[in-house]
Image (cartoon, rainbow, N blue to C red):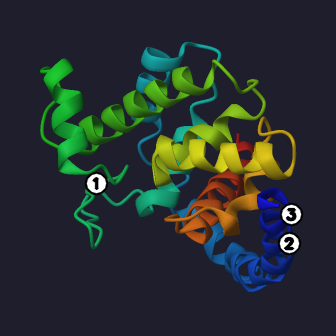
Amino acid sequence: MRRLLIAITVLLSAGALAPSLSAQDAARPADRRLAERNASRYDDTFRRYSKRFFGVGFDWRYFKAQGMAESGLDPTATSYVGARGVMQLMPSTYRDITSRRPDFGAIDDPEWNIAAGIMHDRYLWKLWAKSIAEPERPAFMFGSYNAGEGTIMRAQNTARDVVGSAEAWSHIEQVAPTVPRWRYRETLGYVRKIDRYYADFRVRR
């Protein structure tokens, strides 16, 4: 009975996603203009810390795309909840990271903010390595960065109930409207925005 109710809710909510997706599509030219303005900003920093925390073979442009989605690569950006810098890290998260990496400097220094953001991504990447295949893992990593890993795990549980599988990000998108205590539109839009910036950066290289 619970599975049936959730499935009905998913179907009814699907239409509610349409306005959000249309708005994101309409915003794409603005995303591209921002990407053009920041075409080479902080490239060396993203390359350096991507290589350090993910290895030579990982595409550093994923993290630059994330920085674009987070702040437009603005090192002075501060969110309404207090997240700061290029990678929009909460001060408490940054303190936890620097407790293990005392060589990192101030949170508002773009180099250390980017380094800490990629280091946090590495934690999430390894967390999802246990259950998510590599082609799908960036979406789970970035979704968790935005919403918290606990939220995405709750979405997985719902997807297993309704869809019968939770190993693809599309499964998470399908059930997102039924997951309680989650601003799912923000997270789904965030992951899609990273994908768009990443695609734009790949074209430029």
Residue designated by label 2: 8
Q: Which residue is mark 1?
A: 85
| Cβ–Cβ under 8 Å for marks 2 and 3 | yes
Label 2 – label 1 distance at C-alpha: 41 Å
Eyeballing the image, is 123 above or below 46? above
x then y, percent, for residue 39: 56, 53
Mark 2 crowd level (few <14, some 14–19, many ≥20, 10 Å Cα): few
The residue located at (83%, 61%) in the rendering is 1
Disc 2 is placed on an element classified as helix
Residue 4 numbered tag: 3
Give the residue displayed 78% in from the left and 35% down from the top.
Answer: 167
As shown in the figure, which amino acid type bears the numbered disc 2? Ile
Q: Amino acid at mark 1?
A: Gly
Can residue 190 be seen here? The reply is yes
Which of label 3 and label 1 is nearer to you?
3
Other-residue count near label 1 (Cα within 10 Å), few / some / many at <14 / 14–19 / ≥20:
many
| Point 22% across, 39% down: residue | 94
Q: Where is residue 17, by image quadrant?
A: bottom right
Q: Residue 119, image x and y in percent?
A: 38, 27
Foreground: 20 or 161? Answer: 161
User: Tags 2 and 1 in contact by the CB under 8 Å rule?
Assistant: no
Q: Mark 2 vs mark 1: give the one in front.
A: 2
Locate residue 71, reporting x and y percent: 41, 61
